[in-house]
Amino acid sequence: MQVQHLSSAMSRTAVIETAAAFILEGKLVALPTETVYGLGANIFNENAVLEIFRVKRRPADNPLIVHVASLQQAMSLMLDLPVYFEELTNRFWPGPLTLVVQKNAAVLDCVTAGLASVALRMPDHSLTREVIRKAGVAIAAPSANISGRPSPTNAADVLEEMGDTITAVLDGGSCRLGIESTVLDLTGVVPVLLRPGSITREDIEAVIQTNVVIGHMSERQPQSPGMKYRHYAPRTPFHLLACEGNLSSPITAEIARYHSLGKKVALIAPETFSSAKVEAFFSLGNGAPVEYARLLYSALRTLDKAGVDVILCPAIPEEGIGCAVMNRLRKAEGRHTENAV
């Protein structure tokens, strides 16, 4: 079966109605969000949810994030209203903040990988919220890629990655932010940051006026996507360069070292390095953390097809959104730090 590309060639009403109908039929539909494209399924259809795990080759103990279109829909899936939930949703929903709360009996165990909690978020993309409203059901939607690969940030990436394993892709253009949502656990006494994202720890603390604890890696079952397994990795070997002060010297030296070994090199870096002597280059614009976040996955996917032996990328300071960017870069490289989430 050929995947259907639901695009601007159709009317807005038609794409929304078609996508919602597929969801209600138990089909998988890739949906745009402000972060990355998600692979959507009806959370009340067990077969559809299990199909997500199958086509993504996703470990069964890795819970899914549930996307909602309203606060009422979110609350219908919760056991109770946790502290800070209203303050956070009033400030950050719709947006790239996922909140982990205690689930009620309406949520299937396959959605949460058997956990007593469920991860909820309201995406800041009007097309996807309208699909959820039209379908009348919340939608589980992990990133629309094979597990471990860079997340897709446009419809073309989804089509290339997932092929005919899914029913449709709703084309909502390129994702505005480019990295997955921040995940915050509200099931305990103290809020715990399980995965950094565009909404920073400092942003959250400013709203709730209390400290947020950083979650730690564990070999136990993860409470959130992105906590345990290697993620975001290209097939080509990828290496992160620890650059302090002047970036030019370590980058130039590392390129020269690989060339001396007969290796073809690709570089992901700010535009100021466009003249570097490499076989392939992907510009990160002015190199600001938001540009790293927006362009990173596109860079990894593009250079993975460039026929090179290694992809290099300079590190950035772990401040603000830089924490989330470095989290993704380390996992793309296959390294986990003690407090990586």
Image (cartoon, helix red, strand yellow):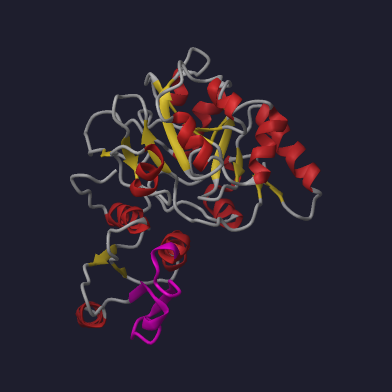
Pick whichever, 33 or 17, lies toward us. 33
**Residue 54 in view:** no
Looking at the image, residue 285 sits to the left or right of residue 196; the answer is right
Name the quadrant of the C terminus.
top left
* Residue 102 quadrant: top left
Position in image of residue 142 (x %, y %):
48, 39
Pick whichever, 59 or 107, lies toward us. 107
> Which residue occupies the extreme top position in the image?
105
* Residue 30 quadrant: top right
**Residue 23 in view:** yes
Looking at the image, residue 229 sits to the left or right of residue 64; the answer is left
Pick whichever, 234 or 138, lies toward us. 138
The residue under the point 22% across, 35% down is 218
> Which residue occupies the extreme front position in the image?
209
The residue under the point 59% across, 58% down is 174
Q: Considering only vertical position in the picture, is 117 above or below 288?
A: above
Looking at the image, residue 121 sits to the left or right of residue 10; the answer is left
Position in image of residue 319 (x %, y %):
30, 58
Name the quadrant of the N terminus.
top right
Q: Considering only vertical position in the picture, is 44 above or below 229?
A: above
Position in image of residue 156 (x %, y %):
59, 57
Q: How many marks?
A: 0
The residue under the point 22% across, 38% down is 216
Q: Considering only vertical position in the picture, is 106 above or below 277?
A: above
In the image, residue 108 lies in the stretch drawn in magenta: no
Q: Which residues are magenta?
A: 265-290
